[in-house]
Image (tube, rainbow, N blue to C red):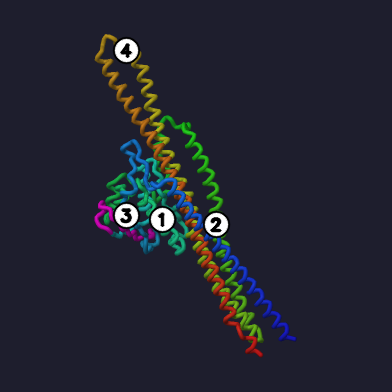
Amino acid sequence: MDNHIQDEKLNEIDYTLNQWQHEMTQELTNMKAILSKLQCRRRDDNKSEQMINPNTSEYLILESESLQVPKSGSRPYFKVAIEDPQKVGDAINAHIIYKVRTKTNSPSFRSSEFVVARRYRDFLWLYNQLTLGNPGVIVPPVPEKHALGRFQDDFVESRRVALERCLQKIVAHPMLYGDPDLKVFLESESFNVEKRQRRAEPESSKMSFMRSFGETISNAATSPFTKFVEVDEWFESKKNQLDALEAQLKGLLKSVEGVVKQRKELGSATSDFGESMFPLASAELNRTLSTHLMVLGEIQKKMKELHEQQAQYDIITLENTIDEYIRIIGSIRIAFNARVKVYQAYQQADSELQKKNVLFEKVKIQQKNKPEKLVSWQQEINEIKSRVEELQQEFQDISKLIKNELDRFDKEKVEDFRDSVEQFLRSMIEHQKQIIALWETYFEQTDGLEEEEC
């Protein structure tokens, strides 16, 4: 009777495990099919883009000399990697140092390959410098500053990946790769000295990320024309789209963070489940059932590591991309604010011109016998008029630049999210393969135990 009950238990375990294996195999097949569809769609999109515009690598050259965008065909080669993060400093001043390795064929640099050491606040300095020096350009943002958990291995690796991605986008940008501040950041051996000799550095290491955003545009509020009424429907539509996209991305980020948390909790629960098998196996008198329970417990403990690995892949593939684009929307708003600042300066100069014209009409009546004063007034009005025309042209140029930047943003967004989804699916497929392989070891280790018992 006891043997019959034990046989039933073993049959139930085998049936359950076979069901799990079948379900995971089916899930793996479905994910492969989705990945194949994504790859086919990518090839179709690339063909369509080439048919529509064979010169997609060309960036529009603006009318203003100061805002010219170089043709991408003449861009030098850059390969940037961030390596070997190391914790340095004492308990109070501890921080992470990253090695930034650059390979390039640009003649502007001292050599074709060089490595420098940089910390987080140096990356934030670079972001602020590029934003200040390139109004209207969407500068790729650095990851946000964190006070808690910043020395944990998973966080350090996640930040390393985000910083590397940020730098790679900067050197690929047609208006940023030649910036002198980028050159100093990438190759200077005396960086702390050189950066102080350049534009004033904000105390960014003591600020939150969004406050550092505000630092770059604080001067915009000094104009008396603080209220800005949008004059271009295209920009108003884009602002609404960005607000909606930001809300959607924040909701998606919260969901992915929930999935990551659940994976980690599942790993811990699986390990606890495996641990509970061991005392049960030790107490079991039937050797075959005891072995089944021991093998099952070991597999459950190993499963924890797989779930934790997948949680980290979720962060690297999906969470980092979503978080990056939420921060890019912040950079887009800075570009919009730079345009507002130019418009306010233009309106202020135009208002001053109107006042001068009104006064000039009065002066012409009062000083009609003093032509030398009228000439002086006319010269001053002409100077203000030239300034108004310059600011008007600058406003038109920065508006055109931002439109080009947003076109670039839309294209990169599609590519980046498609790549992230593909990488996520690949990691999930590999994860499921490893789980299936782990369950198969169960059958390998328990096969033939019933015959031995007999």
Q: Nearer the viewer, residue 393 or 1?
A: 393
Mark nearer the N terminus (3 vs 2): 3
Which disc number belongs to residue 46? none
**Is 226 placed left or right of 187 in the picture?**
right
Give the farthest residue toward the right.
Answer: 1
Relative height, residue 67 to residue 353 (above, below): below
Residue 21 highlighted magenta (yes or no)? no
Mark nearer the N terminus (2 vs 4): 2
Q: Secondary structure at mark 4?
A: helix
Mark nearer the N terminus (1 vs 4): 1
Relative height, residue 360 to residue 406 (above, below): above
State how far apart marks 2 and 4 are (Cα): 71 Å
Q: Secondary structure at mark 2?
A: helix
Query: Which segment did they paint magenta?
Result: 93-112
Identify the residue at image location x=41%, y=42%: 404
Q: Amino acid at mark 1?
A: Arg
Q: Which residue is mark 2?
A: 256
Local packing at callout 2 (Cα closer than 10 Å; few below 14, some 14-19, many 20+) is some
Given contact means CB atoms under 8 Å apart, are the residues at marks 3 and 1 in contact?
A: no
Mark nearer the viewer, 3 or 1 = 3
Q: Secondary structure at mark 1?
A: helix
Given contact means CB atoms under 8 Å apart, are the residues at marks 1 and 2 in contact?
A: no
Q: Amino acid at mark 4?
A: Lys
Mark nearer the N terminus (4 vs 3): 3
State how far apart marks 3 and 2 are (Cα): 35 Å
Q: Which residue is mark 1?
A: 165
Q: Position of residue 42 (x, y in %)?
A: 48, 55
